[in-house]
Amino acid sequence: MASQRQATSASQVPHLSPAELSYLYTSLSLPKSPIRPDGRSPTQFRPLSAETNILPGTNGSARIGFADGTQAIVGVKAEVEKTVVAADTLDSRSLGQQGDQLNREGGEGSAAVSGQGEWVQMSIEIPGFRDDDALPVFLSEMMKESLVGSVEDGKDAEMAGGLKGRLVINKRWHWRLYIDVLLLSQPLAYPLPLLSLTTHLALLSTKLPKLKSTGEEDPFFDDDWAVAEYLYPRITTKPTKHTPTAQSHPVRPPVTLLVISVGENIIFDPNREEIAVADAVLAISVTRTGDSDVLKLLSIRTIDPPSRLTNPGIPNSENVNMLGATASGESALLNPATGEDEVSRVWRPRRGGVKRSVIARMVKAVLGKGGVGEEVLEGLEGVEVI
Amino acid sequence: MKSLRRDTSTNPQAANVTSKVYVRSTRSGKVQKIVRELYLREDIPCSSKLCSQCPKIAPADANGNIAPFILSDRPAGTKAFSKGHYLLPDTNALLNGMDLFEHTGAFYDVIILQTVLEELRNRSLPLYNRLLALIKSDEKRYYLFFNEFRRETHVRRGLEESINDRNDRAVRTVASWYGTHLQQSAKKAKKEKTMPTIVVITDDKENLRKAKEENVTALSLSDYVTGLEGSEFLLDMISDSKDARDAKEAARGDLFYPEYFSMSKLTTGLRAGTLHQGIYNVSPYNYLEGSVKTSAFDKPLLILGRDNSNRAISGDSVVVEILPQDQWKMPSTKIMDEEAVTRNDNPDSEENEAVVTEKERKALQEEVKKAHGKNAEGKPQPTAKVVGVIKRSWRQYVGHVDSGSTGSQAASGRRQQNVFLLPMDKRIPKIRVRTRQAADLLGQRILVTIDAWDRDSRYPTGHFIRSLGELETKGAETEALLLEYDVQYKPFPKSVLDCLPSEGHDWKVPASKEDKGWNGRRDLRDLLICSIDPPGCQDIDDALHARQLPNGNFEVGVHIADVSHFVKPNNPMDLEASVRGTTVYLVDKRIDMLPHLLGTDLCSLKPYVERYAFSVLWEMTPEAEIVSSDFTKSVIRSREAFSYEQAQLRIDDKSQKDELTDSMRNLLKFSKVLRQKRMDAGALNLASPEVRIETEGDEVGDPLTDVKTKAMLETNSLVEEFMLLANITVGSKVYEAFSQTALLRRHATPPPQNFEDLTNQLSKKRNMELDVSSSRALADSLDRCVDPKNPFFNTLVRILATRCMTSAEYFCAGAHAESEFRHYGLASPIYTHFTSPIRRYADLLVHRQLASAIGYEGEDGHAVIEGVSTRSKLEDICRNINVRHRNAQFAGRASIEYYVGQALKARGEKVAAAGKDSGIEEDGYVMRVFENGVVIFVPRFGIEGVVRLEDFVLPGESGSRSVAERRELAPHRTTDFDSEEYTLRVGEKGHPEKERGVTVELFQRVRVNVSSVKEEGRGAGKRRVRIMVIEA
């Protein structure tokens, strides 16, 4: 285990022979129509079951289970905390020689203090890993980045400044958010999509107690949990003749999707075997902006592909046993997708890297109208969030 | 992508588990979501004696007994509910009508829901406690039904449903469940008997409407009460309901008082130190001036006028904001009486109401002028205004109806009208009460409670509870006193009496020493012990002895009644005693802390019989140096019970040569030495204006001769010295044993600024100095305050000095640092109360602690140290007995004051019958000088009173005028007040100075005429002691 953990930040490498790897690679890289081991289409996700608010003690929680048995639980807890007055706030105070007047007037306007990224704390627990191992640390950093990074410029006052802004209570107080992510099973595949989707659902169901105090007073909350407000505000549309009461979220937490490229193909939600032969593994974070239906790309991070650590197959030309045998048809060819010399049907560990055009196609597949991103968000929307 | 949700609807167990979710904000600022799981059950009984099912399923205790069923099988009914009914009140009904529910004439068989009880606790803790008491008592048949735990009656909160709506629904659900449940059980029992109706009582209109929809019988409280007998009387007991007030508020938009800050704004301000919290106190001389002592400042902050006091009532815990410096003022130098200033208010007309009436405003303006004029030399004090109330300390108030406020319709029968109630306590504002029985209530002492004080009302509104009887009748006035000082005066309940020894008065110390009663007790029966007490004392706490030892030293013993032997910790008697805290002595009545049997017989160290005692024994050298001290439980036999006079006579009688007298002489000798030592250490000789009333005199004689100032005999001081010594010795012993939990008594060193006024006055008027640097210095300087021409002057200064000090208090050793234990007045580093366990609960606790400290193991061999070892519990007890102790003192004083008034009245009537001038002439002393009057202390009766301008009899004027005539004089009086010199000159308008004018100054001795007068005119029916200055 230890060596595996050291080996890669991605999931464990399955024990596949070079021949198997080569077979997998070939079928996945078939132009236009890759054949995936489980028969899915390139953009198809594994079926999952999801529910929210499973942990009554938390402010919000969710559970998602994939059909292969991997399950994750996310709990979100919020705590009121005093804001340490930053240096620039102090400055403005000393500058405010004009006196109280300025302070009073500025009360509302300057209340929009921008939040800080440290207010969101995320910890990921994966069985068999210590919490300071590379995988959990890397995953939590990556997920937190998109979470606190999504800043709304929008007109929606409540979510101004994104999640960070939402956590501001007033100049002196803020919420601190603890997101605890727990993977319940051994990570069969790279757990990022599972964890990200679960976190997304948990955040959607997260509520904060309703604030009763106003302005710069010490915060004081309504003790009725039923009136608590959602962290990500919802809009309830009045039921019409045709549609029942529906709720929609103008702003949603980001979702991080895992995409691999194999040859010219791009494949979503890869399983363990697929990752093992990927040319490149990318984590793409998207979110929906407040005012439009257009998805917004938050980040693309590359992930060290495990395929570079696989054992290579040996082409006949280099095989001592085969010395002298005819090497016809075994000439090295240039793989157009990766720009590497390859002998067909002989596995060679991937050296990583991805072409611009492939990335462009990935982004397009995610963000495009009716694309994967939209599909995922819609699917998650279908989960009844209580 | 496809997602599936796990389905839980088919889980059969899911219905039995539910949870309650709420948000809790902790004091440290944390905000937590709290989830409590609820496991629903089906075995919670309905507790109706009619039910045949519930007895089978009700949970049984370890002995297989189920709790007895409470609700009667023949509940009372009304005209509308001839079959009888069970009542099911909601929270608002209880909030508005708790007095009704406590009423003994109606409201039996009531089902109290857990939901309602919890809601009530959040809304009003005092009402919650009263409801609990009702549920506990058997006679009213109140049943607490845990509806939230029973599966059928548990109600899950719907989406978007408010808590209130949900709770209302819970009440209705229970009502309909009870209905069907009882019906079913009737069917099963084949008794087609008519079942009682379940009547929901609610004042919520929406709830009433929904109840109708759901076929649940529901009535508003007033509708229900209207159907009862004597309804007009009962209706008065409903508090001024919120709905009615809301409606009123909506109708009229004008609000007189500023709104309170929001809770969060208050806490922010308090934390930031911009707002201050404290108890609001009203000056007894000026109802418009209050003060709030805050922890931030040494001196209390002044609160002037109604605007600033903003609906706070004396005793409330308030939050104040300091006013800008230009609004700081001098404290008032004027006497202002609400009754006099607002005499003409009409309680019904609210149209021309203003917070500050024109008259009040004028009075205040003059104040301000004064303050501004003095600004140069006098220092204005910081003033503040009330911006929020943390906790109301409203209680029930005793008072009488202001006859002027009943208006002309008083005679017109049962119409509901507003009247003003004038509380006995002058610091409490008038209370507006709605009543239908105004005419009947005139001239009665009545009990009311305050319901609310809204922004649109000048006075608080309240409702009538009951009448105590006619004004000035002994019963009514005594009960009024007890209620006013919160003295528990009801007879001991049976549970307490059950704790008494079964032998009753025949109980004796066991004859055989083998008896377990003798375990750990020393036999001191052969000692020559005697007790010295006030005459007629029945509860003898203490007895003494002294004898010479072979080595030339003396053995001195103080023996205290062993009350802790009879009162075991945590039994009902102990709990009752800890609530009562102390015995209260009124002039003609004693309200015992312990049942009669113990206090005056079994515990009392009566002469000639053997009694259990707790003894403190010292070995002393002839110079009264203590060689050793010893504590033991003992058995004693007192040889004689003396009164102070008897003892004094016996000691002084040279012909008495018996051992007992010798022993007393020795005691006296030691006590003198001890006293001198104490004085040398700096103990203060304080004075309080106490008089004693001896009611044994014949009825026919002049009742005033019963009023005696307390004489100090040597024997008084003898007993006092040894009690102090015993208390000090025991104090250090229990502290040694229980460093955290010892119950001690301390008297904090008063801050020097408390004495500022007195020091100023003394140096101005008498050129005397008061050194307050230490208790020793103070004692010495008090000794120097002597006026050869005025022998009472020294006592007067002592009385005033005593008022500058803080009061002594009980505390738990762990609550203060050891250096703070000091008893300032006694100049002792440690002190406790040990010597009067019959009449003080603190002493009883100290007995238990001491018993445990000396390893006394009790009758059955295992020491009971319960109640002496938990600090938090002890601190609660300390808090209670401190309050009780103070109240008992106040009640005692008020009782004497009342008695003096009555004695004066009786005398006045007798003398008046003989056709002479009423009133009695006495010496009085000026204690305080105001701009429009003085406060005079009359030592003969131990009373002090305000003398207003009209009550100065000017030279050449006849002193005998009625109150009404004198009042006419007031506008003609001129005054010249010098606040720096503390003098007041009263003259008459239009008269040349000199001849007709009186000047009084502070500390001056004046001749006064004391009489008891009945107020006439609008304030009719109230009697007060009137003091007139007749000669300055």
Image: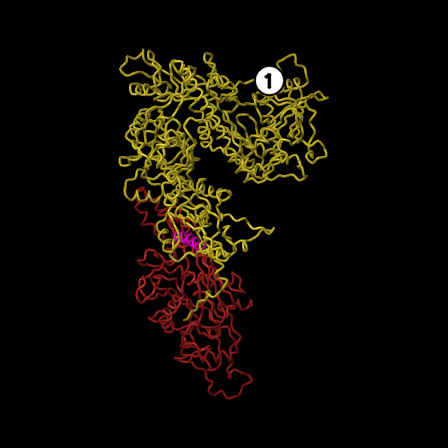
Q: Colour of chain A?
A: red
Disc 1 secondary structure class:
helix
Is residue B559 placed above or below B919 in the rendered structure? below
- Find residue A288 and report its horizontal and vertical position in percent: 35, 64
Find residue B646 and report its horizontal and vertical position in percent. Answer: 60, 17
> Residue B376, how many percent across, how many down?
33, 24
Q: Is residue B1011 above or below residue A149?
A: above
- The front one of A265 and B746 is B746
Give x and y (percent) for residue B288: 35, 30
Left or right relative to B13: residue A93: left
Q: Is residue B176 magenta?
A: yes
The residue stretch that appears in magenta: B163-177
**Chain B, hue in figure:** yellow
Give B545 or B229, whichever is nearer the viewer: B229
Look at the image and tell me whether residue B695 can be seen.
yes
Question: Would you identify the image quadrant in which residue A203 lies?
Answer: bottom left
Near-viewer residue (B490 or A318): B490
Side of B824 relative to B228 (left or right): right
Answer left or right for B622 relative to B147: right
Number of callouts? 1
Disc 1: CA contacts within 10 A as few (<14), some (14-19) or many (>=20): some
Q: Chain of mark 1?
A: B
Taken as a whole, is the magenta stretch helix, strand or loop?
helix
Give the residue number, with chain letter if any, for mark 1. B646
Left or right: residue B857 compared with residue B10: right
Q: Could one spot residue B41 in this view of the protein?
A: no
